[in-house]
Image (cartoon, rainbow, N blue to C red):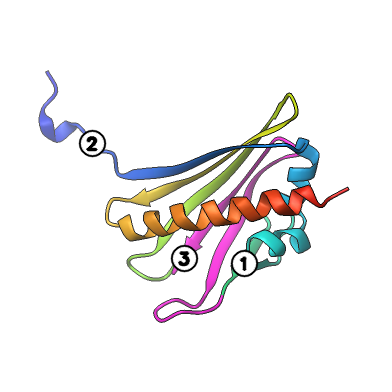
């Protein structure tokens, strides 16, 4: 029999957004991994698709936030999978440390795009809600950027 104190509650949650896009994986991959294209749909950045590369995403600063998201590339599988850390306020006690994973699956007439941001702690409900809203916008713009690529 398992004692109740031996059962560990789920300590984090993930945000998952699935979208079908009428573009080949190669176009979406370019939009996900070329810094200048990322800036068009996401944020200003110094991204490079190299495992171990540390980069920043930069937004307009707000009260209690510098506007900087610290990241590190974890996985690069061209035209298929990309993952990076997503850390806000790394030094603060309420820091948000997540992992963003993109998975591209070719489908007839396009690509199934899956974005998962994992690692939201229970007390980060506002961050989760904000991310849910933000990623919907970002992914819509990602599709627009991919659409205009040759």
Quadrant in the picture for the N terminus: top left
Quarter location, residue 101: top right
Q: Relative to 104, is 38 above or below?
A: below
User: Element at badge 3?
Assistant: strand
* Residue mark closest to the camera, 3 vs 2: 3
Q: Relative to 48, is 51 above or below?
A: above
On the image, the x and y values in percent for residue 84 come to 59, 50
Instruction: Kindly report the distance in space between the C-alpha atoms of the residues bearing marks 2 and 1.
Output: 34 Å
Determine the residue positioned at 38% across, 59% down. 127
Question: Which residue is under mark 2?
Answer: 8
Judging depth in this view, the residue of 7 and 29 nearest the camera is: 29
Q: Relative to 61, is 14 above or below?
A: above
Secondary structure mostly taken by the magenta-highlighted segment of the chain: strand
Q: What segment carries the magenta color?
A: 60-89
Question: Which residue is under mark 3?
Answer: 88
Instruction: Kindly report the distance in space between the C-alpha atoms of the residues bearing marks 3 and 2.
Output: 26 Å
Q: Are marks 1 and 3 in contact (CB under 8 Å)?
A: no
Q: Earlier in the sequence, mark 3 or mark 2?
A: 2
Q: Are marks 2 and 1 in contact (CB under 8 Å)?
A: no
On the image, the x and y values in percent for residue 50 come to 73, 51
On the image, the x and y values in percent for residue 144 come to 71, 52
Determine the residue positioned at 42% across, 43% down. 14
Q: Is residue 150 magenta?
A: no
Question: Which residue is under mark 1?
Answer: 56
Q: Residues within 10 Å of mark 3 (few under 14, many from 20)?
A: some
User: Element at badge 2?
Assistant: loop
Residue that extends furthest to the top in the rendered view of this protein: 1
Determine the residue positioned at 19% across, 32% down. 7
On the image, the x and y values in percent for residue 16 come to 48, 41
User: Element at badge 1?
Assistant: strand
């Amino acid at each position: 029999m398992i004692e109740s104190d031996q059962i560990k509650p789920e300590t984090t949650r993930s945000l998952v957004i699935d979208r079908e896009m009428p573009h080949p994986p190669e176009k979406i991959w370019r939009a996900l991994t070329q810094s200048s294209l990322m800036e068009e749909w996401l944020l200003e950045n110094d991204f490079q698709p190299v495992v171990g590369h540390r980069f920043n995403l930069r937004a307009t600063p707000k009260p209690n936030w510098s506007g900087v998201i610290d990241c590190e590339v974890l996985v690069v599988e061209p035209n298929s999978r990309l993952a990076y850390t997503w850390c806000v306020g790394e030094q603060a006690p309420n820091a948000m440390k997540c992992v963003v994973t993109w998975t591209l699956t070719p489908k007839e007439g396009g690509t199934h795009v899956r974005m998962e941001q994992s690692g939201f702690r229970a007390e980060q409900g506002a961050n989760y809600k904000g991310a849910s809203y933000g990623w919907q916008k970002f992914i819509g713009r990602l599709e627009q950027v991919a659409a205009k690529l040759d």
